[in-house]
């Protein structure tokens, strides 16, 4: 016999035992016998103030019953009135027929301690004589009609977790066990801090099909504070939850039930002693079809409005780890339970998710990192996301818009696959008008140099195909100012950021950089941010250690080679082309007083006379072109290695840091 049927038989059997006892001994005598021999009857002390019974009508009324705990002192349950009317003749045909059962004023406390409920001894008392391996089908039929539970109060305690339901009402017009008659019923629960749950259900006794309608109205989230306390540390939850859900299925396969309806959450606020951690103005969810057995979730519309949340990174964890309750508390609240997993989705059942319309609006998110040398805080305001037909089984499209610090704007368009995200992703992202000072903590961490001013823009196209990343970035910077290198910071990358940015600026104080980032995302060494800074660092180091070419490009000079002026082995004077290169070099050093230029002659000249004449001619020409004396240096180096050309190596540097 199934566990549910056993409990039902036990309950009805107890009532029948009381009926029979009352019939045999008469009500006053029966009441006295029950009060004196409760432990033999039910395993615990029982006290009844009033009992009436009519054998001819099958009517039993019990008033003011107290059932005590195992210690015989503390009260386990109390009710004001139990009124039962039974048909006695069907008992001869193995049929229990109760025409009505009314229980009023029930007040019961359920306590769980060390994996044992305080009502376990009651079950053990009636189950002790029954073989635990008995699977013989029962030929008894139980028919219960007009069941009413009126204004019950239920209490539950498990350690620090406590629940209280101040007003529980149950109405079941008909319920049959062992027969094929239809059953129906309703449950109404009022919650302590506001809200009411109404459930109406019906069951086809012939084929086991059922239907259920559940309506949750104005449920205050404060009602779940006891549960929240076991999972989260010093957290409170405000807001209201409403739902209207329909379920259809068969009792033999509950996981295959189909669920539809709506869920609405309003005024959510997750608070901590330090302040609000997250809040939400409104969330609405429209469920078209939900099937747990098939792992299918078909959502017609998901709307989120007014989300405000922050995520912070600390040296010892993050916002979430600090919010979670200590491990020992969480373990104490998590009990080992044995559940029937028949019909549940297996790991092999793929998730089938479909969202017909996704709309996120008026969201404000903040990311903060306290592990950097300087605290980093980056707020994103007015975030909105729009998408249609989001599915795990194919490609998707979404559009994102947001406001960044300093009046910047973020726009993004995404197309990609959720299930196989490494196989196909495309993202176009545009950032305009971002205040660069917001990025200074990251610049200090990676380069040791702070950003003091500037406006940042970025256009990026990111493609992932078969785990290979191809990310093309175009960086647009205006009036960037970088401070001196911090001596208290050990940078992640040795990048002369201040020098490089200074060189990259054009005459209008603009910087345009193409920054490609590529790599295999399956590689254990893959780290996107480190790859970005490595690529950017290589570019900036190249610019900073050879600024002549960068400055030449910025000035629009035509000389193609500003790193080496090649000379013929027997050359004694300079050609027109070589004088043109020197003229461009003079223009470069005149453009910026921070540029230092060295021309090192690498040529075989045993007596040094030819080198002296060439150096003198070069030096004089640069002076004639207006190059400042203090910014140029002409010298003779080592002869070139065998097979290498003779000429002037152009060495340039910036004197900034």
Image: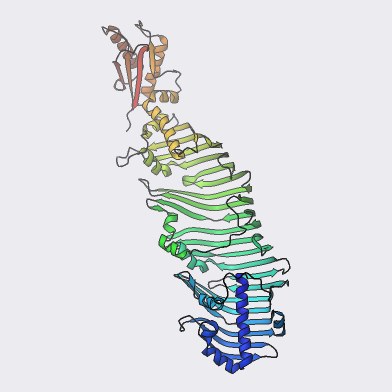
In depth, the one of 497 and 33 nearer the eye is 33
Quadrant placement of the N terminus: bottom right
Percent x, y for residue 561?
Answer: 42, 18
* 635 to the left or right of 21: left
Quadrant position of residue 329: bottom left
In depth, the one of 140 and 465 nearer the eye is 140
Percent x, y for residue 645?
Answer: 37, 12
Q: How many marks?
A: 0
Quadrant position of residue 31: bottom right
Percent x, y for residue 446?
Answer: 38, 39
Q: Is residue 195 placed above or below 369 in the rendered structure?
A: below
Percent x, y for residue 228?
Answer: 48, 64
Q: Is residue 625 placed above or below 144 in the rendered structure?
A: above
The answer to whether residue 388 of the structure is visible from this angle is: no
The answer to whether residue 266 of the structure is visible from this angle is: yes
Residue drawn 65% across the image and 76% down it: 171
Coloration of the structure image = rainbow
Quadrant position of residue 33: bottom right
Q: Is residue 414 placed above or below 104 in the rendered structure?
A: above
In depth, the one of 174 and 656 nearer the eye is 174
In depth, the one of 269 and 67 nearer the eye is 67
Quadrant placement of the C terminus: top left
């Amino acid at each position: 016999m199934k566990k549910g049927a056993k409990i039902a038989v036990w309950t009805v059997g107890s009532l029948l035992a009381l009926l029979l006892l009352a019939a045999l001994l008469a009500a006053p005598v029966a009441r006295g016998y029950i009060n004196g021999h409760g432990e033999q009857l039910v395993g615990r002390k029982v006290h009844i103030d009033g009992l009436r019974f009519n054998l001819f009508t099958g009517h039993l009324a019990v008033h003011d019953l107290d059932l005590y705990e195992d210690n015989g002192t503390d009260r386990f349950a109390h009710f004001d009135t139990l009124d039962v009317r039974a048909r006695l003749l069907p008992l001869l045909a193995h049929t229990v027929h109760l025409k009505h059962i009314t229980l009023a004023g029930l007040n019961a406390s359920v306590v769980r301690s060390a994996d044992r409920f305080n009502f376990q001894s009651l079950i053990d008392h009636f189950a002790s004589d029954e073989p635990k391996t008995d699977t013989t089908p029962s030929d008894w039929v139980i028919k219960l009609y007009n069941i009413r539970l009126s204004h019950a109060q239920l209490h539950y305690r498990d350690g620090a977790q406590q629940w209280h339901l101040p007003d529980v009402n149950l109405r079941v017009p008909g319920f049959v066990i062992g027969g094929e008659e239809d059953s129906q019923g309703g449950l109404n629960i009022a919650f302590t801090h506001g809200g009411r749950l109404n459930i109406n259900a019906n069951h086809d006794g012939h084929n086991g099909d059922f239907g259920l309608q559940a309506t949750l109205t104005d449920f205050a989230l404060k009602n779940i504070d006891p549960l929240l306390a076991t999972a989260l540390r010093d957290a409170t939850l405000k807001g209201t939850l409403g739902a209207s859900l329909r379920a259809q299925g068969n009792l033999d396969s509950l996981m295959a039930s189909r669920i539809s309806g709506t869920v609405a959450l309003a005024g959510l606020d997750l608070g901590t002693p330090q302040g609000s951690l997250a809040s939400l103005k409104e969330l609405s969810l429209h469920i078209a079809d939900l099937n747990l057995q098939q792992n299918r979730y078909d959502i017609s519309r998901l709307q989120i409005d007014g989300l405000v949340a922050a995520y912070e990174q600390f040296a010892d964890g993050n916002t979430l780890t600090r919010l979670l309750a200590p491990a020992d508390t969480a373990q104490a609240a998590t009990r080992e339970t044995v559940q029937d997993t028949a019909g549940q989705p297996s790991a092999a059942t793929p998730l089938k998710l479909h969202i017909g319309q996704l709309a996120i609006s008026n969201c404000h998110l903040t990311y903060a990192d306290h592990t950097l040398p300087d605290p980093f805080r980056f707020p994103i305001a007015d975030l909105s996301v729009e998408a249609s037909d989001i599915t795990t089984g194919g490609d998707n499209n979404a559009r994102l818009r947001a406001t960044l610090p300093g009046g910047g704007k973020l726009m993004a368009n995404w197309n990609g696959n959720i299930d196989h995200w490494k196989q196909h992703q495309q993202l176009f992202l545009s950032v305009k008008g971002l205040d660069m000072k917001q990025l200074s903590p990251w610049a200090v961490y990676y380069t040791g140099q702070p950003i003091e001013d500037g406006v940042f823009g970025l256009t990026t196209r990111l493609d992932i195909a078969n785990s290979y990343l191809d990310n093309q970035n175009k960086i647009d910077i205006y009036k960037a100012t970088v401070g001196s290198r911090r001596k208290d910071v050990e940078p992640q990358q040795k990048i002369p950021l201040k020098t490089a940015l200074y060189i990259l600026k054009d005459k209008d104080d603009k910087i345009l950089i193409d920054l490609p980032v590529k790599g295999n995302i399956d590689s254990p060494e893959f780290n996107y941010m480190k790859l970005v800074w490595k690529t950017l660092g290589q570019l900036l180091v190249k610019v900073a250690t050879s600024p002549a070419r960068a400055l030449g490009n910025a000035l629009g000079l035509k000389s193609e080679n500003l790193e080496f002026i090649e000379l013929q082995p027997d050359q004694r004077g300079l050609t027109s082309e070589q004088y043109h290169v020197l003229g461009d070099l003079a223009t470069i050093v005149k453009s910026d007083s921070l540029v230092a230029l060295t021309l090192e002659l690498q040529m075989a000249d045993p007596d040094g006379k030819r080198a002296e004449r060439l150096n003198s001619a070069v030096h004089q020409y640069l002076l004639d072109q207006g190059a400042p004396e203090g910014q140029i240096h002409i010298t003779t180096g080592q002869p070139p290695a065998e097979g290498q050309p003779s000429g002037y190596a152009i060495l340039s540097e910036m004197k900034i840091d």
